[in-house]
Image: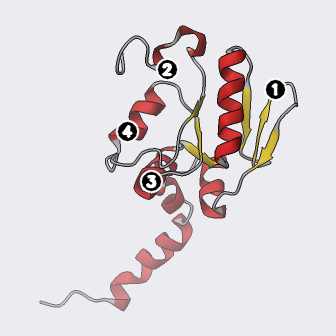
Amino acid sequence: MAQGPDFVVNNPAYAGAPVLLAGPNFGCGSSREHAPWALEGMGIRAIVAPSFADIFRNNCAKIGLLTVVLPQADIDHLMARSEELPSAEIVVDLVTQTVSSADGSFTRRFEIDPFVKNSLVNGLDEIGLTLQEGPAIDAFEAKRSDLYPVTA
């Protein structure tokens, strides 16, 4: 159990929620991969906040955890709505780059780096990205000995 029984992620009303609403500079002090892994292990698939620590945001992208930046006023609105109606769903759509309420009363567009979007949409980590270049790597390796002969 994180923190104590009153900590928001321990509230049964939000159990299994895949979207985490957070405050500014979320993830600061979390330079290790363990912070995103812990959130992913809790079932979080997207974090929506006004800003993120850069290294935290990069570590999230590497494991397929989406970070979405929205203005503080939008975060405040979504938090208030989730407190009033804990069962109300927030929908994060990476393809359309939108965050919306399931009932359609709220929709905001967010920006994302095209490279990160492509990796997330296609489920590609660093190894998967490298494997996409398999034919070029094989071609290089086939002629590598001729280009760089081993000398004693």
Vertical relation: 121 (above or below) 34 = below
Amino acid marked by disc 3: Ala
* Mark 3 closeness class: few <14, some 14–19, many ≥20 residues within 10 Å: some
* Nearer-the-camera pick, 18 or 77: 77
**Residue tagged by mark 2?**
8
Sequence order check: which comes first, mark 1 or mark 3?
3
Q: Which mark is residue 35?
A: 4
Sequence order check: which comes first, mark 4 or mark 3?
4
Vertical relation: 2 (above or below) 20 = above
Q: Position of residue 123 (x, y in %)?
A: 59, 46
Sequence order check: which comes first, mark 3 or mark 2?
2
| C-alpha gap between disc 1 and disc 3 | 28 Å
Quadrant the C terminus occupies: bottom left
Q: Which mark is residue 102?
A: 1
Amino acid marked by disc 4: Ala
Q: Are marks 1 and 3 in contact (CB under 8 Å)?
A: no
The residue lying at 71 percent from left, 41 percent from top is 74
Vertical relation: 21 (above or below) 11 = below
Q: Which mark is residue 53?
A: 3
| C-alpha gap between disc 1 and disc 2 | 21 Å
